[in-house]
């Protein structure tokens, strides 16, 4: 169809079907829904686990209560608390642990002991856990989950580790899931050896 000089061409709008959520978000939603199914309402959730109003409202109608601080949760409740994985300082679970009853504290210690035993068994078989906190982001060993505006560190630095990574020899079994700084000076180039993360732990 010919278009006159003073006439705009027809605009074609293509609507895409939704792609869904990443695996971490699916797991977070599933965790809250499973807690609701096992323990019943209410289940407290520290921070909104997903930036999707429809999902958050749906969880609220099922009995999830979203709070910003642990102090907002009543002292006289035995309801479970689900923590948002993104950017929760280590002090927050520590505060929850300090306030927990002795039975729950024993359970936490048992889970931590089991984790240490598992990591020792993995290490005996050549599997090593690594934590790239403070290193330059390297897509060979890490998967960036989000950016963190922080001009105090070089841009491209790992400033949060959501999930540690695992290697066997020089092969990555699972990349570390990380938050990467944005806004500072550019990071220095990585070391030339390049066959392993800078800090295996």
Image: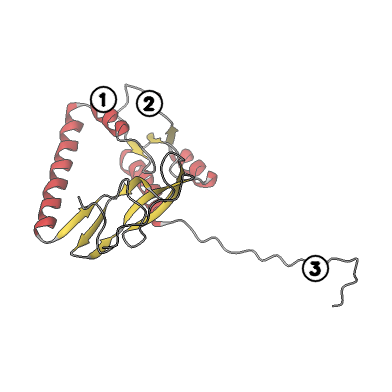
Q: Nearer the viewer, mark 1 or mark 2?
A: 1
Which of the 4 quarters of the picture holds residue 128? bottom left
Is 97 situated left or right of 35 in this image? left
Expressed as whole percent of the image width and height from the top left, the position of residue 71 reads: 37, 23
Q: Which residue is mark 1?
A: 99
* Earlier residue among tags 3 and 2: 3
Q: Considering depth in this image, is 124 or 68 the residue closer to the camera?
A: 124
Do the CB atoms of the residues marked 3 and 2 lie less than 8 Å apart?
no
Is 64 situated left or right of 133 in this image? right
Which of the 4 quarters of the picture holds residue 165? bottom left
- State the residue lying farthest toward the top: 75
Expressed as whole percent of the image width and height from the top left, the position of residue 143 reads: 37, 57
Expressed as whole percent of the image width and height from the top left, the position of residue 63 reads: 43, 37
- State the residue lying farthest toward the bottom: 1
Which type of secondary structure does the marked residue at label 1 adopt?
Answer: helix
Q: Nearer the viewer, mark 3 or mark 2?
A: 3
Q: Nearer the viewer, mark 1 or mark 3?
A: 3
Separation (CA) of disc 3 from disc 2 = 55 Å
For disc 3, the neighbor class at 10 Å (few under 14, some 14 to 19, many from 20) is few
What residue is rendered at 40% in x and 51% in y? Answer: 187
Q: Which residue is mark 2?
A: 73
Q: Quadrant of the N terminus?
A: bottom right
* Earlier residue among tags 1 and 2: 2
* Earlier residue among tags 1 and 3: 3
Mark number displayed over residue 10: 3
């Amino acid at each position: 169809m010919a278009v006159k000089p003073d006439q705009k061409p027809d605009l074609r709008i293509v609507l895409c079907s939704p792609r869904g959520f990443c695996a971490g978000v699916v797991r977070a939603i599933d965790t809250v829904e499973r807690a609701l199914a096992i323990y019943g309402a209410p289940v407290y959730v520290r921070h909104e686990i997903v930036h999707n109003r429809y999902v958050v409202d749906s969880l609220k109608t099922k009995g999830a209560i979203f709070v910003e601080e642990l102090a907002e949760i009543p002292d006289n409740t035995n309801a479970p608390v689900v923590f948002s994985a993104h950017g929760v300082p280590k002090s927050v679970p520590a505060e929850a642990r300090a306030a927990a009853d002795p039975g729950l504290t024993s359970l936490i210690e048992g889970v931590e002991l089991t984790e240490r035993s598992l990591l020792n068994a993995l290490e005996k078989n050549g599997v090593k856990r690594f934590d790239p906190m403070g290193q330059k982001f390297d897509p060979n060993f890490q998967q960036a989950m989000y950016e963190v505006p922080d001009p105090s560190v070089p841009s491209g630095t790992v400033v949060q580790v959501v999930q540690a990574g695992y290697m066997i020899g020089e092969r990555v079994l699972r990349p570390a899931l990380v938050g990467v700084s944005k806004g500072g000076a550019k990071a220095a180039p990585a070391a030339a050896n390049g066959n392993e993360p800078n800090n295996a732990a």
